[in-house]
Amino acid sequence: MSYVENNLMSDEKILFKATIHWIIYLFGAVLILVGMVLPIAEELKIIICLIGVYSLVKAFIFAKTTELVVTSKRVIAKFGLIRRNTVELNHAQVESLMVDQSVIDRLVNAGTILIQGTGGSRTPIPQIVRPLEFRKEYFSIIENDKD
């Protein structure tokens, strides 16, 4: 069971979940490929491939331990495997929800969600799949709460 599911308040329901985009694996995969095909010393190839494997493992752990959820009452973001960071804001405490996308992010429909709370805290959640859809869904949920 996920962190969010274990920490729901009474009468709180998960309405929308975001996922991490596959692009986070690209750097590690490219390093491994480069390490395998470059005509360089074997020791250097091994080092480049090991850095690529490390990058892939790090990306995998990030993808599996990151949660971004909109519930009927809050926005919840959770990061980390051993060291856990969480941000939980009631809908009334969310001042803005911004999307940051590079050119490559736009091409693959990924991006970073920036959640800004009323206290000025800004929480980035990087490499989310379909970030504009997440923002649209969030504001749709907020509008339905007002009705």
Image (cartoon, rainbow, N blue to C red):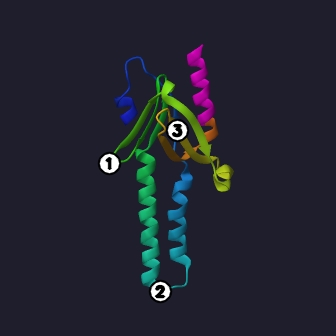
Decide whether residue 139 is among the magenta residues. yes
How many numbered marks have been drawn onto this rendered protein structure? 3
Per the rendered image, the range of residues in magenta is 134-147
Find residue 1 and report its horizontal and vertical position in percent: 35, 34
Residue wearing tag 3:
115
Name the residue nearer the viewer: 82 or 89: 89
Residue at the limit of the structure toward the top, as seen here: 147
Place of residue 27 in the rendered image (x, y in percent of width and height, measured from the top left): 53, 63
Q: Secondary structure at mark 2?
A: loop
Q: Quadrant of residue 114?
A: top right
Point 48% across, 42% down: residue: 123
Asked whether residue 4 is drawn in magenta, I would say no
**Could one spot residue 13 in this view of the protein?**
yes
Can residue 2 be seen?
no
Instruction: Name the residue carrying label 1.
Output: 83
Residue picked out by circle 2: 41
